Image (cartoon, rainbow, N blue to C red):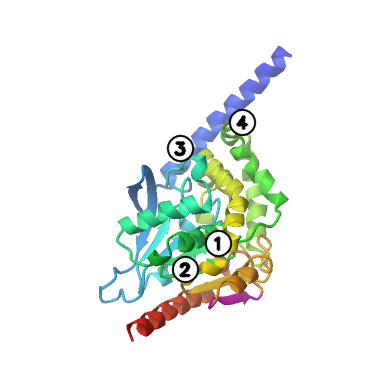
Amino acid sequence: MRGGLTLAAGLLAGLWLDTRRRTNRAEQEHPPTGHFMSVGGTRLHYLDHGPKRGSKDGTAPPVVFLHGNGTTAGDWALSLLDEAARHRRCICFDRPGHGYSEATPRRDAGPAAQAALLRAATRKLGLERPIVVGHSLAGAVALAWALDFPEEIGGLVILSAFTHPTPRPDFLPFMGPAIPAAGPLLSHTVLPPLDRLILPPLMRRIFEPNPVPPSYNELSPDLLLRPTQLEAAADQLAALIPGVAAMAPRYSEIRCPMAVVAGREDRIVDPHAHAVPLHNAVAGSTLHLLAETGHMPQHARPDAVMAAIERVEWAMTSTSAHAEA
């Protein structure tokens, strides 16, 4: 009995040290490429691309990009950021606990708390009434932003988002790091090596029926599987269904221009359970269901996502002109 406990303790210690080694190496090989700011005691990392508003090329409203769960702001840099930043200022945040942004307390893991933090960061950067683009879980964050701060948001582009409280037993395996007390032990020991094994097939499923783009090899698995990111992703996933359950009855309150974009072949979020009812709830929104496209339209169909952003820009301009008239 004692020998077994000693062996188990030694195994956990070895896994803990290996996780620390891999984390340190990943951070050395992939240092932060953006800027840092502190908001409400939380240090956030963000990318800031494109011309400032009022410059020769900065004619369009600013855009804030929010990545999905478990990845980083680098997802946008690998997809459509360069194109989006040609004529508009684009801010891509590492959401709390992801990438190089600090995690917030577990009580602030829900969409509304994230939205409040990122809204404060956006105000600190001097962005006025940005278009907020939210992908997957971050679509719920973008919707919370529009509901709680309606006068401070110019428009929404909601991509492949989880927006309604549908049962998701498949979330449970990814919520281990959110278990009180045991979660941090799991995230520092057994989960990183297990997740390294499942990451390639998981990525293929996330992108299906589209291929995983070669550029995704630039995202270090060990950077994505750091204990802090696993814990933040688990906390935010655990808070997602209660968060959207509280928001869904209020979607009809959204008045800003909104485009809802989803892949018809999405294997992660059913567009008919989320994108379609969201569109039906928000008057004046547009719905774009993309054929032969999965959960990652920003990679598979960046042209369609850019068109959605431009459509929201046009609607903002039209609304402003009508109000002035």
Q: Which mark is residue 182?
A: 4
Return the residue at label 1: 214
**Percent coordinates x, y for residue 112 in the rendering:** 49, 53
Quick one: quadrant of the N terminus? top right
Mark-to-mark CA distance, 3 and 1: 25 Å
Q: Nearer the viewer, residue 57 or 6?
A: 57
- Measure the C-alpha gap from mark 4 to mark 2: 39 Å
Looking at the picture, how far across and down is residue 86, in whole percent?
A: 36, 73
Residue extending farthest to the bottom is 325
Q: Residue at x 62, y 36 (%)?
A: 179
**Residues shaded magenta:** 284-291
User: Mark 1 touching mark 4, by CB under 8 A?
Assistant: no
In percent of width and height, residue 198 lies at 66, 47
* Amino acid at dot 3: Asn
Q: Is residue 36 left or right of residue 65?
A: left
What's the amino acid at mark 2?
A: Leu
The residues bearing labels 4 and 3 have C-alpha atoms spaced at a distance of: 23 Å
